[in-house]
Image (cartoon, rainbow, N blue to C red):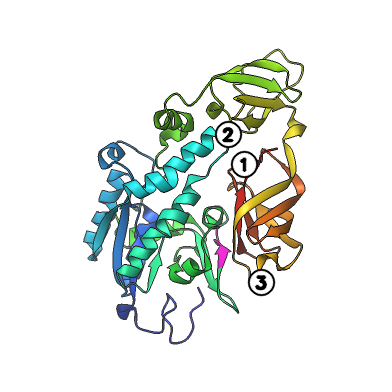
Amino acid sequence: MTRTSGVNSLGFAKAPKDTRVVVAMSGGVDSSVVAAQLKAEGYDVIGVTLQLYDHGAALAKAGACCAGRDIHDARRVAETLGFPHYVLDYENTFREAVIEEFAESYLAGATPVPCIRCNERVKFRDLLETARDLDADCMATGHYIQRKMGPARAELHMAADPARDQSYFLFSTTQDQLDYLRFPLGHLASKAETRALAARHGLAVADKPDSQDICFVPNGNYAAVIEKLRPGAADAGEIVNLDGTVLGHHRGVIHYTIGQRRGLGIGGLSEPLFVVRLDADRKQVVVGPKEALATRVVPVREINWLGDQAFDSVSEIPMRVRIRSTKPPAEAIIRPTGPTTAEVELLTPEEGVSPGQACVFYAQDGSRVHGGGWIWRGY
């Protein structure tokens, strides 16, 4: 963030010691560095960590955020640096707002992104309100995204390091939340810089590995989690071609994803087939040739708009959009169909588009994030 004369590094016209900031601490290196940096600059820092599921069960989970040992690591950082730290039990909230919807969406044949819902419904809603209750001037996180002051308001921008950019997971941040949030790591050129800062501050987590899995999905085994949450819900059914011809049988649509080719158990065909649709109502896995995966028009709803004009004030908005977190934004035309709904035309068709995924909007040039929405219907 560009600093103005008389304004501190968090954008307030007062001394750091008079500026209270709540830091959302996951126990990892990123949020720990944020807390250490702000404490070193003289801010009134309070650390808050969320317990999102059973503490005892979490202790055994490596490679996932918000686990028991991560809570311990966050607490240790706070003790070492000398600022207050609180652990909040959000287990019920997390289960109701994130895990239950994840299970239902997956069973319905969608591809949910629970990390976005967690940011939207837990971290940037309930935790942010807790920060306000603590009379904090702002809340800071370790996310790799940038908040910049534009001519009209605070703007959301991609991280300086494209490899670390987390804008896909934060598109639903509202303008009101953005006004209150701060992202001190978004300008860094690489994760190596973050780890160097951690070492400089003497943090024990400087070399701690990054979390890889969704916190409640160890080893990335979605199906196992769904079977535990909804016993018996994964009914067997048919694998069918686009014309409805039965090619085989499956043990539950939750074991398949759009675009999947391997493990279908329907060998001996003249051409490779891919999963092109999951029909949960009919308990069918629909397969077809690779070209059947290409999608050009994507319906999107629950749109969070961060642009300067009213979203549905124009008929077409040229943008870049991102449908997967791992792919760069691509050219598209957004056609609003209401205040929070639109059809998005991809100028270059994409493969494997699935309901439940996010569609995030970016400026045609530059790094600004204009929000996004949820893909809601399969093809």
For the residue carrying disc 2, how many other residues have a C-alpha within 10 Å: few (<14), some (14-19), or many (20+)? many
Please name the residue shown 40% across and 29% down the image. 228
Q: Which of 36 and 19 is in front in this view?
A: 19
Compare marks 1 and 2 and give the one earlier in the sequence.
2
Q: Does the magenta stretch include residue 122?
A: no
- How crowded is the residue under tag 3: few (<14 C-alpha within 10 Å), some, or many (20+)? few
Residue 238's spot in the image, x, y percent?
Answer: 62, 19
Residue type, mark 2 in image: Gly
Q: Residues within 10 Å of mark 1 (few under 14, many from 20)?
A: many
The disc label shown at residue 249, or none: none
Foreground of the two, 174 or 26: 174
In the image, residue 264 lies at what x, y percent?
Answer: 62, 20
- Which residues are the magenta region? 156-161
- The quarter of the displayed image where residue 40 is located: bottom left
Dot 1 and dot 2 residues touching (CB under 8 Å): yes
In three-dimensional space, the C-alpha distance between marks 3 and 2, rounded to whole angstroms, equals 35 Å
Task: Residue under label 1, please give it.
Answer: 355
For residue 158: magenta? yes
Q: Is mark 2 on a helix, strand or loop?
A: loop
Quarter where residue 129 is shown? bottom left
In the foreground, 265 or 193: 265
Residue that carries the numbered disc 3 in the rendered image:
309
Return the residue found at the far top: 268
Q: Is residue 329 among what the camera can see?
A: no
- Residue 72 visible somewhere in the drawing: yes
**Residue at (70% x, 37% y) in the render:** 379
Residue identifier under label 2: 109
Give x and y (percent) for residue 295.
73, 41
What residue type is disc 1 on? Pro
Q: Where is residue 329 in the image (x, y as percent from the top left)?
A: 66, 53
